[in-house]
Image: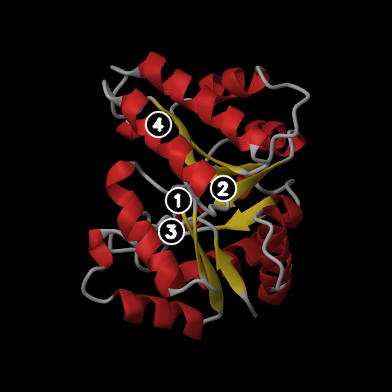
Amino acid sequence: MIFCDTHTHLYLKEFEEDREEVIRRAKNVGVEYFFLPNIDSGSIEAMNNLHYAYPENCFAMMGLHPTSVNENFEEELAIVERELRGGTYIAVGEVGIDLYWDKTYRKQQYEAFHRQIEWALEMDLPLIIHSRESFNEIMEVLGRFKGKPLKGIFHCFSGTTEQAKQITGMGFYLGIGGVLTFKNSNLSDSLKDIPVDNILLETDAPFLAPVPHRGKRNESAYIPLIAQKLAEIKERSIAEVAEITTASALKLFGINK
């Protein structure tokens, strides 16, 4: 079985001491592809260095994370645009709106999200969308592009069945991670009527580790735990889940293997 981790921050300092071993552990359980979302200008170098070290396995994205949007967001967006136009990034991400931590720069988050959607369309790249306490706001911005060929992933989806159907109806995938394994999560119910074809696997490492590692550092080697839980919910084999989600991810990101 071959798996993809469609959202992992393996370049962060949490992995400084054992990054090679973390990747080795993941590959040993079948995780071959690691997709790296950017955060802001401070994460670009480390992310790209990881891509250069593992060019066949680690793929970099470019975007400005909504929680990094502040008074200097125009400068940050200029860097994002320059990188997108001069680099070989496979997606625009991680972008979106986050109204959980701080609403101070709400207007600027809208503007940054809108502009990065425009770049994704111009460059025919998928969007990796971060949506926290902001589903309606995200859909309002996306609605401005109705009829345009948008594509991508709603990262860390944790919403309702109705929201899942809205998202997949627009041609986006649901990024499903460790939260699926939590006892207090309603994701199992939300995904009941959603085909595996509309779902991608992710860890968001080092955050949101699945059971039985909840509360500890997450890593890409835990993807099969998420896949197993999804297989149980969908009454499919884990091999089927691996095959379907990997094929979908590679197609979305334009990787020919």
Circle 3 sits in a helix, a strand or a loop, which is it? loop
Q: CA distance from mark 1 to mark 3?
A: 7 Å
Q: Is residue 26 above or below residue 197?
A: below
Give how far across and how far down residue 57 sits, in percent. 52, 72
Do callouts 2 and 1 mark residues in contact (Cβ within 8 Å)? yes
Mark 3 to mark 4 CA distance (whole Å): 24 Å
Which quarter of the picture shows residue 51?
bottom left
Residue drawn at point x = 50 percent, y = 47 percent: 86
- Of the two numbered discs 2 and 1 on the same chain, state the one appearing first in sequence: 1
Residue 8 bears which disc, if any? 3
**Residue marked by disc 4:** 78
At x 32% / y 55%, what residue is drawn?
45
x then y, percent, for residue 238? 66, 73
Q: Nearer the viewer, mark 2 or mark 3?
A: 2
Q: Answer yes or no: do the residues labelled 4 and 1 have beta carbons within 8 Å? A: no
The residue sitting at the front extreme is 86
Q: Is residue 206 visible?
A: no
Report how far apart the C-alphas of labels 2 and 3 lie in the structure: 14 Å
Residue on which the image places disc 1: 37
User: For mark 1, does the 10 Å Cα neighbourhood hold few (<14), some (14 to 19), or many (20 or more) residues?
Assistant: many
Lower sequence index among marks 3 and 4 = 3
The amino acid sitting under disc 1 is: Pro
Query: According to the image, label 2 marks what residue?
Result: 91
